[in-house]
Image (tube, rainbow, N blue to C red):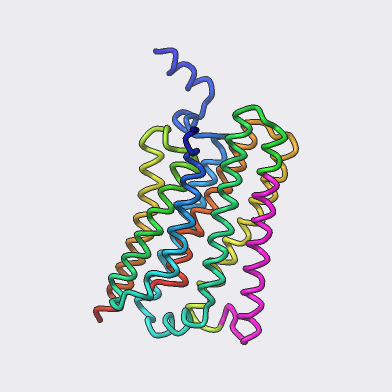
Amino acid sequence: MSTAECEQQETGWGILQDLPGDPMIWVLIFSELVAFGLLLGAFSVARAIHPAVFAAGQATLDSHLAGLNTVVLVTSGWAAARATKAVRNGQRATTRYWLLGAMALGCLFIAIKLAEYAEETGRGVGLETNPFFTLYFLLTGFHLLHVGLGIIILAVVCRRAGISGVETGTAFWHMVDLVWIVMFPILYLVK
Amino acid sequence: MTMPDSVDVTWIALIGLALATVLLPPLIPRALLGNALLLAFAALKGHRIALDFMDIRAVPALWRGLVASWILIVLLLAWLASALVALI
């Protein structure tokens, strides 16, 4: 048995060990990607079954506000990636600044999304309006919960600002970013 | 002169693609082509996030392949559903 194989056996995480951060976060990331993938798949299939309902529902959404939120979340992801670079260079204070920036932008994303929800519910639209809005609120609400959880995780790793913690927290944050990037055009723009 | 960081280049590319996602498709009269374009933009953005932000560029191909497959399957299904609606 080679030295590398011995080391892998000792850590117990096998090939997950090659990923940045705690391997356990990647188990969570891949589980979340499967869950979001199934929900987005269900949305696409439901669109094919109820095209008129989905077209009418989509026409009432504010795609410009959602586009602004894309810029906000992508910029937050950039700040998180910058934090990872800083922590690897041993710059603990700089790491914290970048993480605080990422968290602040995450909070801005939540504020914009809640404003969008307020406008929609103000028009009398809700979870039970039709299949489009059921899936829309389920998908965006589930994603919004992950944004909130991601901010909490970043806040926790920000306290110590160690390499493994920051890599772990930012990996989860980028998953949240990735899911929104894929979700945004499917929900708001695809005709 | 210092080279720009790959993370910064990716961020600028993502902002550009995000703006293109909102601004370009309405200018394309055919829905199928417009949908294909904006889903291709989403695939590009997702790929850059995975490689440069998630930092899986240097990890074994299995992990990059899993994330890339997730992006492609979800976006392809969305395009197929929209194509079905357009053709019926």
Q: In this view of the protein, which residue sits in the foreground, A120 or A103?
A: A103
Residue A128 in picture, x, y percent from top left: 56, 81
Magenta stretch secondary structure, dominant: helix
Q: Quadrant of residue A155?
A: top right
Residue located at (28% from left, 76% from top): B30
Residue A150 in picture, x, y percent from top left: 64, 51
The correct choice, above or below, for A111 with respect to A191 in the image is: above
Q: In this view of the protein, which residue sits in the foreground, A69 or B9?
A: B9
Q: In the rendered image, which quarter contains the N terminus of chain A?
A: top left
Check if residue A109 falls in the magenta segment.
Answer: yes
Q: In the rendered image, which quarter contains the C terminus of chain A?
A: bottom left
Residue located at (67% from left, 46% from top): A153
Image-based side of A103 in relation to A182, left or right: right
Residue located at (58% from left, 62% from top): A142
Q: Give the residue furthest to the left.
A: B87
The correct choice, above or below, for A96 with respect to A116 in the image is: above
Residue span colored magenta: A99-128
Residue B84 in picture, x, y percent from top left: 28, 74
The correct choice, above or below, for A119 with respect to B13 in the image is: below
Residue located at (49% from left, 56% from top): B15
Q: Give the residue furthest to the front.
A: B1
Q: How many marks?
A: 0
Q: Quadrant of residue A129?
A: bottom right
Image-based side of A146 in relation to B53, left or right: right
Check if residue A185 falls in the magenta segment.
Answer: no
Q: In this view of the protein, which residue sits in the foreground, A95 or A57?
A: A95
Residue A140 in picture, x, y percent from top left: 56, 66
Image-based side of B32 in relation to A33, left or right: left
